[in-house]
Amino acid sequence: MGLTKQYLRYVASAVFGVIGSQKANIAYVTLRGGEKGRYVAVAACEHVFIWDVRKGEKVLILQGQKHEVTFLCPSPDGIHIAVGYEDGAVRIFSLLNGESNVSFNGHKSAVTVIHYDGLGARLVTGSKDTDVIVWDIINECGLYRLRGHKDVITQALFLKDKNLLVTSSKDSFVKWWDLDTQHCFKTMVGHRSEVWGMVLLNQQNRLLTGSADSELRAWDINYLQEGEPKVKKGKTLLDDDNDEDNEEGSCLYIFISYYIQHCKKAGSILREARDRVVSLTADAKARVIACHGNDSVLELFTVLSEEEVQKKMTKKLKKAKKKALKKMQERKQQSRMVERMLKDEIIRLTNLKASAKIRWVDCLSCAGGELKVALLLQNNTVETYSLRTSDKTPTANKTARLTLGGHRTDVRTLAFSSDNLAILSASGDTVKVWNRSTLQVIRTMSCEYALCSLFVPGDRQIILGTKSGKLQIFELASGSLLETVDAHDGALWSLCLAPDQRGIVTGSADKTVKFWEFELIKDQGTGQKRLTVKHTRTLQLEEDVLCVKFSPDHRLLAVSLLDCTVKIFYTDTLKFFLSLYGHKLPVLCLDISHDNTLIATGSADRNVKIWGLDFGDCHRSMFAHDDSIMFLQFVPKTHLFFTAGKDKKIKQWDADKFEHIQTLEGHHREVWCLTISPSGDHIVSSSHDKSLRLWERTREPIILEEEREMEREAEFEESMAKGDVPVVPGETQGEAAPAGKKTVETVKAAERIMEALELYKEEIRKMEEHKYACEHAGKELPPPKPNPILVAFGKCFIQWLLYIYSPALYSTGIHFGQISSNQMLLSVIDELRVNTLSKVREIRDVMGFNSAALQFLQREIESKEDVMFFAEATGRLVEKKRKRRKRERAILTIA
């Protein structure tokens, strides 16, 4: 029997390079009674980072699992934070220790909004699946699911002192829900496009909504007082519409209105931006409103109190009187001039200009009239501002900016140093060098748009190839740019270090491959020697060059061209050797094995081909990814290689057996590149989600059959979660529904319930047959043997009986609507009610009597024979051994 080839598993080690993901909002949080407005929470892919904006440090990480974070909401007491995920799950973390003990799973797609009620006991969530779910945090269960919207939920707000909920959606509707009866009692249809956000103002008597235009619409809400009837006569479609009150923005009466007397449009506030509202929020006291569009300007409005409005109206009235006396106008016209309008109650505070486009905003009112604003920008940056709302002309001052821990644009190239300790990452404007062990930035240097990079032998300098065709040489000790070389006339797509470490080769879109040698020249400014590159040879080709690679023995040079082929040349003479053709789209990446026998190519046609370098024959073509393959590299001194694709996955392959070994999942967007350390123990990858991920090789072996089985199980679970089958069979699609979700766990639980019911039927049948046999024989016969499952369950008939009762009661509650509508089952339900109560009382009495008897016997035996039962005696024996070992260690220490 031959030896089995062993593969070692790579696992995720860390996520770095991301300051704040764009998919989830930013929120102010409080840590251990700390300063108000000092800490902000942002999403970082599947994790949540808590940043100290004053120090610019990461103070807490709330560890996620697999799916990306989509929404954050701190609790009213500031101790917890609710986190929504891409798969529809919601987890509640403690900000004291960063642990999560409560999780909810009810949505089928991404959570788009989360909101607590005033007491922090309930949670409402909205999702892309158009459902709204209300959760009970204390009992850790879902209360109900509210259906009615036809598009993504954009906001959901509880009303204080009223058991009402208001929701908005991209279907252009705002709905009011009565949570006592779980139904929608009012739908506002005054919007012409999507409703992207809303806030409640003036002690929840006014609703402000943001839509796809430049208006912020305000609606006055009049609630029914206590004692007023909840059914109120209003206008119908048959009523006369020629009344004086029937104007645009007038009362929108409905025939039956619960809690709300009427809801009318109070006016609009015009924004300076012309595009849609991206984010609309208010501070905790609803005194300051912040909104922005797809630009870098944040508009701040303040809501005046009733006293401030009255003072303003008094001044306005005085001015109107003076003007009326001068013009001798009528009194009627004078009253119109001082009419109270929306702009008298909500006034523009100031505009805040950020350094880039704004994605999310959060506001916090502090003591002394100070307003703190936190912005999450679209370029992976967090900025905080502070201003005084009491000033006549408030001016926003920038208080912090978090930029050091990440790039502003996507990282397009990565490289490892020769000692495996430093990582190079370069993007469209900066190049950073990281410490692999601490994941801290060592150097940050400005550069042009980088496409490829490497460490110069000795790890003291780095070389970048840019989109403009230049080579940039940096010195790491000083962090300075040594030289910029105009290498090519087109984008420099690839560069490779020569095996003899004396030079490099570059390939460009100008259809040339150029060879360069390292040189030390005297710097004219400092007089010291510095590194430069000298052009030695040029290979002219007929197509754009996408990738170049030396063979480890320096004998061959592989060049990938835009015509979907790979040309192999002799390095010394540059004569043509082989042409590898077969890909349907251009080859974007390639690599050669350490023993010069194999070359692997990855293409935009999603295939990987493995070729022999002796004759250029294709050993195997494998369908590797669901999208373009962006990067490929062999693990040093092996025939194993990794590929990265636009399908968000990184895969490991065996080039000898042509097998897929494992898939590294973690990135949430396209993976642009990866690099493998010289030792092969670490991998770093970069993605469009702005994150860099570090993967480590463990000592755990991989069994391929188990890997495939795990992949099939994961696919089955995902398909089950996406299914439209209701949780409860026969469930009607009404406004209210259970808050459950069909998962593997729920399916297994349902199967266990059905198994228990079948077992119960079987035991009842055995008991009836035994009773009939005893009556027929005229004597007591031996009882039938119990089912082995019952013996394994607990060896206790009472426990089994209680377990049977619980599925029976659960099934009755689930199907109560269908059962109560069937007249034939009413007598069965009544009999079940009576028998259940009596049997539960009987079981309780038996268990109490037996427990008391056992305790009495235990005391009698211990007092007479002076012995302990096994459990307590074993515990004392362990304690004696622990004390003896402690005493022995103390003696040895003294000696």
Image (tube, grey):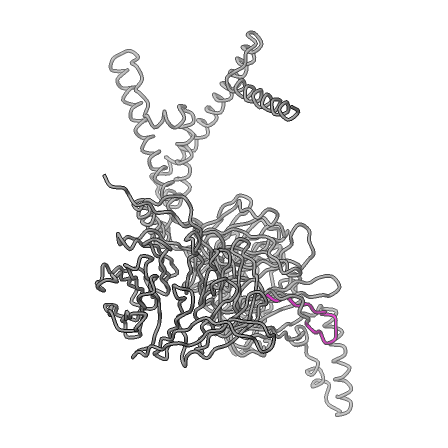
Locate the C terminus by quadrant. Answer: top right
Q: Quadrant of residue 829?
A: top left
Quick check: can you spot residue 817?
yes
Q: Nearer the viewer, residue 438 or 49?
A: 438
> Whole-percent x and y of residue 643?
35, 60
Q: Nearer the viewer, residue 329 or 25?
A: 25
**Is residue 385 magenta-colored?**
yes
Q: In this picture, is 709 found above or below 767?
A: below
Residue at the image position 42 percent from the left and 39 percent from the top = 810
- Total numbered circles: 0
Asked if residue 544 is positioned above or below residue 333 in the image, the reply reads above
Percent across and percent down for residue 374 are: 62, 65
User: Per the image, is 496 magenta?
Assistant: no
Quadrant of the frame with the N terminus: top left
Q: In this picture, is 633 found above or below 761?
A: below
In depth, the one of 415 and 746 nearer the eye is 415
Q: Residue furthest bottom?
A: 327
For the question of whether residue 167 can be seen, the reply is no
Q: Nearer the viewer, residue 218 or 650?
A: 650
Measured as percent of width and height from the top left, residue 182 is found at: 49, 54
Q: Residue at x 39, y 60 (%)?
A: 648
The magenta-colored residue range is 382-396
